[in-house]
Image (cartoon, grey):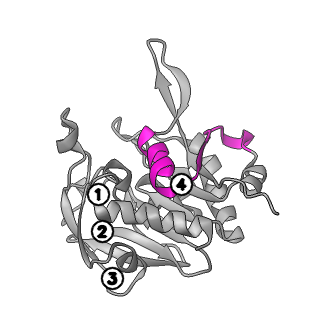
Amino acid sequence: MAVRYPKLIGISCCQKAFGVFGMVNHAASDTYVRAVDQVVGAVPILIPANGKCADVSTLLDRLDGLILTGSRSNVAAEFYGGPPQISDDAPEDPARDQVTLPLVRGAIERGLPVLAICRGLQELNVALGGTLHQRLQEMPGKIDHSTPMQAHGPVRVGKAHFIAIRPGGVLDTIVQSTRLAVNSLHNQGIQRMARGLLVEARAIDGTIEAISGTGRGYLLGVQWHPEYDFDRDIASQRVFESFGAAVRGV
């Protein structure tokens, strides 16, 4: 009888300064780990943001799926030909980008399921050749998509606006709705979408809120954070359930 090993899900980390001395750590929110534990039903593996030292090929050989996490940091402008970012409230993390961009390209080539969340959606677009708006909140005609500066968690990560979902598309099939209330905690957004991607949802101001891939395998990017409320929001739970089903091949 063949031995069945548990599925391994890579979760991208960021470089972040911790402690009184600001030492560099590699970190991902506990919410992603819990979503993999409780909904995906797999083993979460944290992928360090170790830049050019990352062994992407070995990671791809071992992983059964990939989650690109959200983050306060932005995708570095050098990777999509954008102007230098000068705002202090939008730090970059090029060491993470040096890991995740080739990792997502390799995952897609191998047909590994990929779930890209917030910053992850932006990484996915850049990895395939797309570009980004850097600060949506400063663009004419755009609503403010950035994080509400509220200490009270339920307000900070609560539903912020509605999105319109493409009828009959991948996301509609997953969440079983063409209209959804989502949270909103990002500065960047898709400017030019990469080839090989489809728009699955938009905000009222036209901002792309979800994308899928045109090729084989599971490839979904969402601009909001379903990991914040997967334990109480059915749509958020269904996103992780769909990813888990793809990882298990069912």
Mark earlier in primary sequence (2, 1): 1
Q: Secondary structure at mark 3?
A: loop
Horizontal and vertical percent position of residue 236: 34, 60
Task: Pick the quarter of the image with the N terminus.
Answer: bottom right
Q: Secondary structure at mark 2?
A: loop
In the orientation shown, which residue stands out farthest toward the right? 1
Residue position marked by numbered label 3 in the rendering: 166
Mark earlier in primary sequence (3, 1): 1
Region of the chain picked out in magenta, as a range: 29-54
Residue position marked by numbered label 1 in the rendering: 136
Between marks 4 and 2, how big is the CA–CA gap? 32 Å
Mark earlier in primary sequence (3, 4): 4
The nearer-to-camera label among 3 and 4 is: 4
Mark earlier in primary sequence (4, 2): 4
Horizontal and vertical percent position of residue 129: 57, 68
Find out whether the residues at labels 3 and 4 contact each other: C-beta distance under 8 Å.
Answer: no
Q: Is residue 151 magenta?
A: no
The nearer-to-camera label among 2 and 3 is: 3
Q: Pointer 4: residues within 10 angstroms few (<14), some, or many (20+)?
A: many
Between marks 3 and 4, how big is the CA–CA gap? 28 Å
Horizontal and vertical percent position of residue 128: 58, 68
Q: Secondary structure at mark 1?
A: helix
Relative to 151, 39 lies left or right: right
Q: Pointer 2: residues within 10 angstroms few (<14), some, or many (20+)?
A: some
Q: Quadrant of residue 64?
A: bottom right
Q: Secondary structure at mark 4?
A: loop
Q: Residue at x 26, y 79 (%)?
A: 178
Residue position marked by numbered label 4 in the rendering: 41
Find out whether the residues at labels 2 and 1 contact each other: C-beta distance under 8 Å.
Answer: yes
Between marks 1 and 4, how big is the CA–CA gap? 35 Å
